[in-house]
Structures are given as structure tokens and as C-alpha cells.
Amino acid sequence: MKRILKRLFIVPNALFIALLLIQLLPDKAYRIEDRPVYTAALAIALELILLAASFLVKQDRIRHIFTDVLGLIFVFLIFWVLATIKFDLPGSAKQAVFPPPGAVLEKFTLDLSQTLVNIRDSLALIFHGYLLAAAAAIPLGLFLGWNMRIGAAAGYISKFLSSISPIVYIPYAIVLLPTFRAASVFVIVAASFWPILASTMSGVLNVEKRIIDSAKTLCVGGFTMLFRIILPAALPQIFIGCNQGLSVSFILLVSAEMIGARSGLGYYVNNYANFGNYTSALAGVITIGIVVTVITFLFNLLQRFLLRWKQ
Amino acid sequence: MSKIEIKNLYAEYADKDGKFQALKDVSFSVRAGEFVSVIGSSGCGNSTLLGVLQGIISPSSGSAFIDGRPVTGPGTNRAAVFQHYSLFPWMTVRKNIAFGIKQAKKSLPRNARYAAAQVFLTRVGLSGSEHKYPFQLSGGMQQRAAIARALAMDTDILLMDEPFGAIDAKNRSNMQKLLLSLWEGDGPSKKKTVVFVTHDIDEAIFLSDRIIMLSNSPGQIAAEFDVYFPRPRIHSTIRETGEYINLRNKLMTLFYDENTGVAAAEEYTI
Ligand SMILES: Nc1ncnc2c1ncn2[C@@H]1O[C@H](COP(=O)(O)OP(=O)(O)OP(=O)(O)O)[C@@H](O)[C@H]1O
Ligand SMILES: [Mg+2]
């Protein structure tokens, strides 16, 4: 009994109640497009997850992640409701740029089927570019890092090239590549290639000497050395670059989908922002955030599995 | 012809103020099937000497010959146990050993490699840990796995750098016996040639046909001793004999003469 109470009296639950209560405050601004019922529905859905997590998840660490993240979402929603509807901080002139959560959620629900198509198309684009980049950067990085002499020069050249934003290449990509789609993929490739290459090279250079000596005395051949010894030994570092590459890919998704795309999350956000529909644009931005979070989570699982031999 | 021959070997490391002489004019040879121990205090070039034989350190002058051919790089006729046991951390213990076997005997089918790996794991007392990764093992267990890898490769020559350093007295004694039984050959296979670096004088006497003592800065050969005790040796029996005490005293005197190390003094008091 005491344990149940202890799990009920936590800050996130209080925040949930606060979020529902502030809906009752009088609206400051007259905002026709707000749908408080959507906000409340989302709050209740999140609260159900929170309750389920706080009673079903045994491990303290994971339960705390749930309660803390959901608590922070409640704080954010409270602030959003107060700022846009109850106090109208932006002022009536800028209302359109700061839609209330209810309106964004309504758009989100209405556009859901389009959003799913967008997610599919954006992920297809990102994985296409990202996998191409990784497939090129990892073997190249292994080779350059292993041949130290070329590697030193390549290090400086790649520093120089990686400092150029891939957006700069877009006109060239459009002119040189056969399709718009190829140009979009190229933007993602250009974004993720450099961090993966750099981390692979430094990973190779940092492989412990005793591991290389040990492999040498076993007389491993060049291919085995590169792919069965150096690659796994450098993998922890390579993953750092792969993580960076993934973040940068999503950051550049909007730019990539500006090139002739007719769907996709970046296209959607960009399109609505251009037409001044910030409610839809914001719904798109939040969707991108959710997708990035889920992908990052899955990627971390993969990383944890492949590096299970590390302490 | 000697199996291993080292002629006027000099080795040096690049230092911030020029060169550091690690080995100076080292010459000796090892007959096929001979078990030779190298004793020398810490830093006198034991590992450097083995590095040259492994083919991962190039001498600055002089050379090492194996079967009459100069050593220019690593070879599958040699298996090494490093001082800092160097398993591959991303392979399980059994995988590590199977990988070593694969490198030494390319033609052996996969099943046979894994079966042989399991046999050696059991012999070094690691059955039950075959699916663990090196980070899940203690230092001594990792060292035993590294020894199992070298032994399982079944090479002509074994180069071992303080292989039993991190292993407790009981396991150490078992490992010594295992090493000797493999060295003598379980079957018709011919004896292996072993170069074995240790800091432990008793261990050297128990195992070796000959002991080479290195002196410090730069590493040079201080003396060589033949060890005549008949085999199979029983530790508790031979350590009572006059010859043993005599030899041990000689080695101790020389060791302390050459090296004044407090740590070493503690290690070797009876
Ligand atoms: N990579 C290196 N660069 C510079 N000097 C080195 C290097 N490796 C070893 N030395 C020096 O060479 C000498 C011999 O080194 P070595 O590793 O052969 O010692 P060791 O006899 O094996 O010592 P221990 O018994 O403690 O392992 C030492 O004095 C050491 O300082
Ligand atoms: Mg050493």
C-alpha cells in the first residue's frame, strides 16, 4: 500500500493535474483554432503511459526515464498552453506564428495518413543516403587510417571538406546528377560521410598496439587484419561518427527535400512554413522530433548489441 | 643446426633525446626441442628480445635466425604469449582460441577448430567460461586463455613473455605442468622449442633446460646456466637437492648483483 502511494505521489502526476486544471483558466486571447480537448486527450494518454510505467516497470533506472521524460513533456505543455492561450505572450499580431497545442494536435490528427507517407518517404531518403555514406566512409576510413602516410594528408583534406555545409553543393548536385531524387540523396550522403570517415580514421589510429601486435604474430592477412581486427577494434569510435552522421542527416532533411520532393517530413514542414501555416509546420517539426528519437533509440540498441563485448 | 640463433643482436628505441639502447650484443642459440628461460630484472630487455623473435621488433644490428633463415616478420611457426595478454576483446574466449588455430592451420575445418579450442580451454581450467568475453574474465583467466590460444596453435616454437605472471600459485603449478606436457609432446609429435621469459627463479629452474640471465641497461647476457635435472621433474623433490640449492644460490647472487630491486628481493625470499 505504502509502495503504491509512493509511486502515485510523484511530481509528474502533479504536473498532469496542473495541466488539466489550467485548461479551466479563462482564455486571454480569443483563439478560434484552439482545441483544448485535443490537449486534454494527449495529456490523458501520456498520463496512462506514465501510470503503466510507474507500476509495471521494475527497473528503477528505466522507470525514472519514463517518469522524468513524461514530467518534462507536461511542463512543456503547461508552458505552451499558458503562453499562447491563457496569457497570449506573443500578442495578437504574432499569434499565427505561435499556435496553441490544441490546434497543432488537431492538425496532427487530421494529417495523420499524410504524415505516415511522409515518414516513410523521409526515412527511405535518409537511409538511402546514410547507408551509401557509411558503406563508402567506413572502408575508406579503415584504409586511410591503416596507411598512416596517406591518412595524415587525408585527415587535413577531410577537415577542410567537412567544414563546408552540404547545402553549398546543392546547385552542383542538381546540375550534375540525373534526377532530383539523386541530388536529395547526395545531400544526405555529403552530410553523413565526413563524420563517419573522420571517426573511422581516428578509430583506426587509436587501436591499441598490443592488439595489432597480437594479430601480427598470428600472421593475419591484409583483409583479415582490416575487417576482422581493425574494424571491430575501431568500432566504438566509428559509432561516435555514425551517431553524428545520423543527427546531421536529419538536420539536413529539410534542405534535401527542398530539391524537387513531393512528400516527406522536410518537404511538408518547409512547404507549410512558406505558406505561413505554422500550425501544420509545427506539427511536422514535432513529428520529425519523434521520428529522430525513435531512430536514435533503435540505433542505440544496435550499437549496444554490436559493442556487447565492451565493458 | 640450432632452431633459433641470435647473433650480435642490438635493439634500440627512439627516445626524445636520441636513442635508447635496449639490447646490446646479445648472442645465443637454442636447439630444436630445447626449453630456454630468460631471466632479467624489469626493464632489461626481456620483452624486446622476444619481440625480435616474434618478428614485430626489428633489431638495429645483428639478427635472429630461425631454422637458419633470418627473421623478417611474424611467422606461423611461432606462437606468442604476450606479457600483457592480448586476447581480442570482441571475440569470446573460445572464438579467440579458434581464431588462433585457424591462423596456424588454415586447412582445419571449422568444427575441428572449435573442438580443439574447447579441449584447450578445458585444459587451462576455463571450461564454463568459453562464451564469455575477455572483459568478463579476471586477469589470470585472460592470461590462461591467451596461453591456451598459443598452445592450441601447436607451433614448433613457443615464445612466452611472463605468461604465468598474473596467475595464482595453484593454477600456476598446473599451468607449468600443462606447458611441460605439451612441450614434451603428448604423442609422436616432436618436441617444441620454447623461449620463456620469467622473473621467477624457481619457475625457471623447474621448467628449463637452460637459463639465460640478462643484465641491465643496456640488456646484455650476464650468464648462462644448464639445468640438468632429469625429467619428468617433481618440484617438491628436486628443490631438496644440493644441486638445486647450489644453482638457485648462484642465480640469486647474480640476480641481486646485477639488479638492486627491492620488489625482487621480496619476491624471492624463502
Ligand atoms: N616503445 C618503447 N619506446 C622507448 N623505450 C622502450 C619502449 N619499449 C621498451 N622500452 C625500454 O626498453 C627497455 C626494455 O624494455 P622491455 O619491454 O624489453 O623490458 P622487460 O625486460 O620486458 O621488462 P619487464 O620485465 O618489466 O617486462 C626498458 O628500459 C624500456 O624503458
Ligand atoms: Mg617485459
Image (spheres, coloured by chain):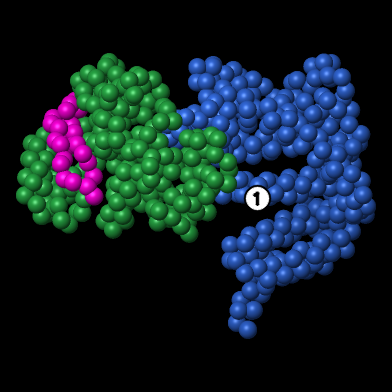
Chain colours: A blue, B green
- Could you tell me if residue B117 is visible in this image? yes
Q: Which residue is mark 1?
A: A301
Q: Is residue B164 visible?
A: no
Judging depth in this view, the residue of A134 and B76 nearest the camera is B76
Q: x, y (%) of residue A138?
A: 63, 30
Picture residue at 89% right of the left edge, 41% below the top = A277
| Figure quadrant of residue A36 | bottom right
Callout 1 amino acid? Leu
At label 1, counting other C-alpha atoms closer than 10 Å, the crowd grade (few under 14, some 14-19, many 20 or more) is: few
Most distant residue in the bottom direction:
A1
Q: Nearer the viewer, residue B141 or A158?
A: B141
Residue B88 x %, y %: 48, 41
Compared to residue B255, the image places residue A293 above or below, namely below
Q: Nearer the viewer, residue A304 or B231?
A: B231
B184 part of magenta stretch: no
Which quadrant, please, contains the N terminus of chain B?
top left
Secondary structure at badge 1 equals helix
Q: Does the magenta segment cover residue B209?
A: yes
Where's residue A109, x and y in %? 90, 54
- In the image, which residues are magenta? B207-232
Q: Position of residue A301 (x, y in %)?
A: 65, 50
Please indicate whether residue A86 sits to the left or right of residue A235 in the image: right
Left or right: residue B269 compared with residue A74: left
* Residue under the image location 15 percent in, 41 percent down: B228
